[in-house]
Amino acid sequence: MEKITILWADDEIELLKPHILFLIEKGYEVVTTNSGNETLDIIKTQHFDIIFLDENMPGLSGLETLKKLKSIKPNIPVVMITKSEEESIMEDAIGSKIADYLIKPVNPNQILLAIKKNLDNKRLVSETTTSDYQQEFRNIFTTINDKLDYTQWTEVYKKITHWDIELNKSSDNGMIDVLKSQISEANTAFAKYIEQNYVKWLHSSFPDRPVMSHTLVREKVLPLLSLEGPIFLIVIDNLRYDQWKVIQPILEEYYRTISDEMYYAILPTATQYARNALFAGLMPTEIEKIYPNLWKNEEDEGTKNQFEEELFASQIKRFGKNFKFSYTKVLNLFFGKKMVENLPNLISNKLNVIVYNFVDMLSHARTEMEVIKELADDEAAYRSLTKSWFEHSPLMEVVKYAAEKKAHIVITTDHGSIRVQNPTKILGDKNTNTNLRYKLGKALQYEKRDVFEVKNPDDVFLPRINVTTSYAFANENKFFAYPNNYNHYVNFYRNTFQHGGISLEEMLVPIITLSPK
């Protein structure tokens, strides 16, 4: 590792020899000068990691030197050292983008701390994060192998998400690989848990079940109607919990997070099923039976989610609620801008529902477009792209407007997605659907260890194409591939984000309540 090189400019540099020797003993290389002009000459020919600059030098003052220095080397951190605590000097220095400032007389430990804060900060944070995760690793491992309930699984996933975000800020690829392995182990155990419990959750005789897609509005949204003021229910299609965590700090400039929870998306974890269930407050076959004109099956022509507003209205009526609401679906930037223009007309409603499809479009675009694949190469990049979008999206305008009007916000989604890695072969007839994470059809053939199979769709309230229809849900990070043209298919879809199956990332999704500051 190369030595950190320091330039120290002070007209009384001879008096600072003990400090300089202290830094040299600590392994730093120190170059000294006693004037501003000489400082500017030196930085043109030598590289420095950090500069200590005396504010009160004869000739070219510290502040004058700082401004010229920043025009030559704008990215070098500069620590201003001054005898004066005068506010105007500090404001001038801070306005010129100093990294830190110290008041004379300084002691060696202050200098050392300034170096570590500005140069070693990332490394120290990385080392601390790695050490903390090493301590947590055993706890998570032990927990995963316990008999967890649905609440404990959400806590495990929250911990894993936290470490995924934190470790990806570090440069410790070894620990990142350990975490990936732990996520895989967790998903293996979670898939078994879902297979053992999912069917019984869906039957009314079983009281101990999590909040799910079809109970979300009843259990988590309608109770909020007692709050004073309007409510915005924002459904961001395909928003993973980790993506929520990176946009949370942006929202918290305007809002306080009242509850940060997860609910369980139904199977298939796909928009057609999960989002219709959310808006209807019913499982798919219940929608098909009660509102046959508002449900479309896989083989039907047309958009499968075109009746969400009607389904939501029917759910409200079914629960005996009577309030004014709006429904807005945003499919592209044009619709987003129209929504923002219409905000003054929405604020008088008790509830405003906004469905935003960007993250889902991003997921599909990443599969099809090479440029998006490069921009969102892995989970960390996918999060970063989502954060960048949100900061500059019409939704950010909604957040600001809602905050001004003291409106509450609920943010949720219909399902998440997982980056698929491992193909598993499947065979089906020509009517089998095309989704990579779930299949429905007759005479499906697959590796049983790789799927959660549902022979009787009635057990999970899913439609039949015919009397022999069955469902197969891929678990962990697997994706279905047909034997024909297998290698091309696998190479094209491996490492893409998909949804429809069973994983922590797809099934455990955020439901967030925000209160204006």
Image (cartoon, rainbow, N blue to C red):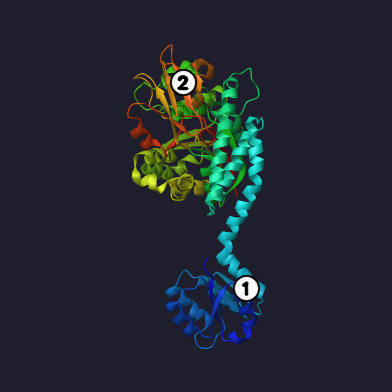
As drawn, the label of residue 358 is none
Instruction: Kindly tell me whether residue 361 is visible in this rendering.
Output: yes
Disc 1 marks a residue whose amino acid type is Ile
Pick the residue in front: 366 or 472. Answer: 472
Q: Is residue 461 above or below residue 375?
A: above
Q: Is residue 319 visible to us here?
A: no
Amino acid type for the residue under numbered disc 2: Tyr
Residue beneath the point at 41% across and 45% down: 341
Q: Which residue is identified by label 1?
A: 111
Left or right placement of residue 12 versus residue 96 in this view: right
Which residue occupies 46% across, 17% down? 470
State the residue in front, 92 or 345: 92
What residue is pinned by disc 2?
471
**What element does badge 1 sit on?**
helix
Residue 403 in picture, x, y percent from top left: 54, 48
Q: Which x, y percent locates residue 81?
A: 59, 77
In the foreground, 244 or 514: 244
Q: Does residue 8 appear to the left or right of 149 in the view shown?
A: left
Crowd around label 2: few <14 · some 14–19 · many ≥20 (10 Å): many
In three-dimensional space, the C-alpha distance between marks 1 and 2, rounded to whole angstroms, equals 65 Å
